Amino acid sequence: MIDVRSFDHIAIAVSDLRRAAHLYAEVLGGELVRGADDLELGIRTMQFKLPPGIKVELLTPIGDSYLARYIAKHGEGFHHATIFVADLAAAIAELQSEGFELIDIDDSMDTWQEAFVRPSSGFGALLQLVSTVLDWAVPIDGLTVEGILAGEWRWMNNTCVRHADVEREGITSVRPPKKFVDR
């Protein structure tokens, strides 16, 4: 059996991030904990923590990206669920031994290792399994919905960083390109 640490979040693909953020933050009372632009993937995200601690991640495309094509094909709605596991390699071995197909396995970073269960093996759901040492429950200082919508934040090495700091300090991503962006 896989050592599941937590069910971290569900991700929802949306076309209107401002309106979706209004629902999850202002109407449902969610607390913004993460969010930024991932220029490599062509997406902008926001993650809200709702009582009793379940998180919802909103994903919207920036330009022509895999997510824009996903929304064009499937419409807005559920995109994936993220489950934190103690040991990704052990989880992969267990899933494969049980006949489940995995895609986009990336264990290249010390801080974030992931693999996805293909939707056809996940009963229609894309499941992201993650082993990480990062704490994704604590809000990022200074992060705001308006700042994210204005493109002031970037995802760099699985951390939200101000765009101004990325440029000033020359921060670069150490993450290899994701294979699924070309699907």
Image (cartoon, rainbow, N blue to C red):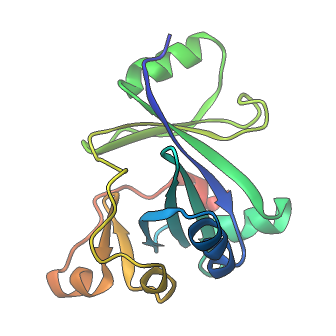
Residue depicted at 70% across the width and 69% down the height: 14
* Left or right of 157 in this view: 178: right
Residue depicted at 22% across the width and 82% down the height: 165
* Position in image of residue 126 (x %, y %): 67, 41
- Seen from the viewer's position, the closer of residues 142 and 27 is 27
Where is residue 103, by image quadrant? Answer: top right
Vertical position of residue 147 compared to residue 15: above or below: below
Task: Name the image quarter holding the C terminus.
Answer: bottom right
* Position in image of residue 155 (x %, y %): 38, 68
Residue depicted at 65% across the width and 70% down the height: 27
Residue depicted at 82% across the width and 69% down the height: 72
- Seen from the viewer's position, the closer of residues 47 and 115 is 47
Vertical position of residue 91 compared to residue 161: above or below: above
Vertical position of residue 124 compared to residue 59: above or below: above
What is the number of callouts on the image? Answer: 0
* Position in image of residue 164 (x %, y %): 26, 88
* Left or right of 133 in this view: 153: right
Where is residue 171, by image quadrant? Answer: bottom left
